[in-house]
């Protein structure tokens, strides 16, 4: 998935589950930052303090994508969580929506980790993994023949919210929410043209390494399309109505947040929950908003401003995610009067959570499901 879901939907669902503004922000920042943590250089202070980054993503064109060790440490555990089904390791590595191994992981985090200072960041990372398990289902995070998509078999169609579509009225929402949908969406043909170009470029290049869902380009990550393709191996067809799948992902995430909050009530910061069904129609429409990532993010921001979280009390300005801001403490570490203070910053807590997640998933959980890949 992309930033509209990993940051905005995640923030909205965290708030609706009853998390306070600050905690929901940490959760959403961590969820989105999983896709952005590519920094490798340590931050160093002359008095011996040293912070080693945890890499949880690579740039799309990075050569590290081809490194089998990196595929395991990055793609498998953070973006294509193994479904655990099948006989061979390659089969077991195929990602499935909220499969049992992931269910076990989440259970463990809720039961054993809720007392940790970095629990909100860990919840955010798990949120990323849960969401991706829906959009990346059917593919695995290693270079595998099972990921190969038959050339020319990829088909897709937009099922968008179009400008001028009759808005869905929802009780308790201000009319501005209902109206703002009309302002969104470039012409659908423009969007599909851009998508077509991108798919041509990505699919051509990806055919060679068969990593992840490259064979299906970014189609699995966009809420407003329906798509299908055929695998090269076996007579297997993969097809998805993304709006429906994304909505199921939101339901799963809301449930997870509710449980996490139950284990760590301090994350509520006195806020109130809001039933997911109360906002089902508006969230489903946001998922189907047509456009590039930025435009879809803008739709979520507008929805927050227009009162999607109403009547929750709190600061309902729409948050903006900036990885540069989050990484700033690393740059200023050499000049910090007390560099140990970095442990209270988001970035350090994210690293704590990410390294815990990597260790727990790769060394403890997955081996017990017969998946030994690191
Ligand atoms: Zn991801």
Image (cartoon, rainbow, N blue to C red):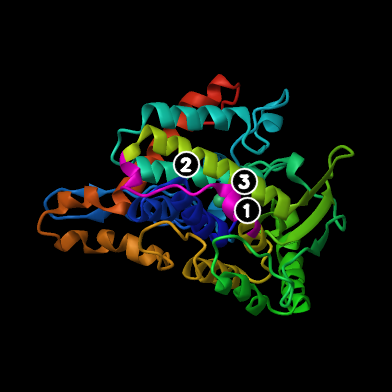
**Left or right, 33 with reference to 292:** left
Mark 1 surroundings within 10 Å by alpha-carbon count, few (fewer than 14), some (14 through 19), many (20 or more)? some
Residue 280: which numbered mark, if any?
A: 1
**Range of the magenta residues?**
266-281
* Element type where label 3 sits in the image: helix
Q: Give the CA separation, mark 3 to mark 2.
A: 12 Å
Q: Position of residue 147 (x, y in %)?
A: 74, 44
For residue 171, the mark is none
Up the image or down, 308 lies above or below 215; here it is below
Of the image marks 2 and 1, the number of the one nearer the N terminus: 2
- Note whether 371 is above or below 299 in the view shown: above
Which element is circle 2 on? Answer: helix
- Per the image, label 1 sits on a secondary structure element best described as helix
Q: Earlier in the sequence, mark 3 or mark 2?
A: 3
Disc 3 under 8 Å from ligand 1? The reply is: no
Q: Residue furthest right?
A: 235
Label 2, on which residue? Answer: 257
Mark 2 Cα shell of 10 Å, populated few (<14), some (14-19), many (≥20): many
| Residue 154 coordinates in the image, percent (x, y) | 83, 57
The residue to which callout 3 is attached is 249
Pick the front one: 173 or 129: 173
């Amino acid at each position: 998935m992309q930033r509209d879901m990993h940051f905005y939907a995640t923030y909205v669902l965290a708030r609706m589950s009853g998390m306070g503004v600050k905690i929901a922000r940490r959760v959403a920042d961590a969820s989105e930052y999983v896709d952005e943590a590519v920094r490798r250089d340590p931050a160093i202070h002359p008095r011996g303090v040293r912070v080693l980054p945890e890499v949880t993503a690579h740039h799309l064109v990075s050569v590290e994508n081809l490194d089998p060790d990196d595929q395991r440490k990055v793609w498998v555990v953070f973006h294509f969580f193994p479904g655990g089904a099948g006989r061979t390791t390659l089969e077991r590595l195929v990602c499935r929506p909220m499969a049992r191994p992931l269910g076990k992981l989440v259970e463990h985090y809720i039961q054993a980790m809720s007392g940790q200072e970095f629990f909100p960041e860990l919840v955010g990372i798990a949120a990323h993994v849960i969401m991706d398990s829906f959009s990346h289902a059917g593919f695995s995070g290693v270079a595998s023949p099972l990921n190969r998509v038959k050339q020319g078999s990829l088909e897709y169609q937009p099922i968008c919210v179009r400008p001028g579509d009759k808005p869905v009225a929802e009780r308790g929402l201000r009319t501005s929410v209902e109206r703002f949908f009309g302002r969104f969406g470039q012409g659908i043909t423009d969007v599909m043209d851009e998508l077509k170009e991108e798919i041509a470029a990505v699919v051509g290049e990806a055919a060679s390494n068969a990593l992840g869902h490259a064979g299906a380009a970014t189609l699995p990550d966009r809420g407003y399309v329906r798509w299908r393709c055929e695998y090269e191996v076996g007579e297997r067809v993969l097809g998805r109505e993304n709006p429906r799948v994304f909505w199921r992902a939101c339901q799963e995430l809301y449930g997870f947040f509710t449980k996490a909050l139950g284990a760590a009530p301090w994350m509520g910061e006195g806020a109130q929950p809001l039933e997911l069904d109360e906002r089902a129609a508006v969230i489903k429409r946001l998922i189907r908003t047509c456009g590039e990532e930025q435009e879809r993010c803008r739709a979520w921001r507008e929805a927050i401003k227009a009162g999607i979280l109403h009547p929750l009390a709190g600061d309902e300005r729409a948050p903006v995610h900036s990885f540069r801001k989050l990484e700033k403490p690393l740059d200023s570490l050499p000049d910090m009067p007390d560099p140990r203070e970095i442990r209270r910053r988001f970035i350090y807590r994210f690293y704590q959570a990410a390294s815990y997640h990597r260790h727990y998933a790769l060394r403890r959980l997955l081996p017990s499901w017969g998946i030994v890949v690191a």
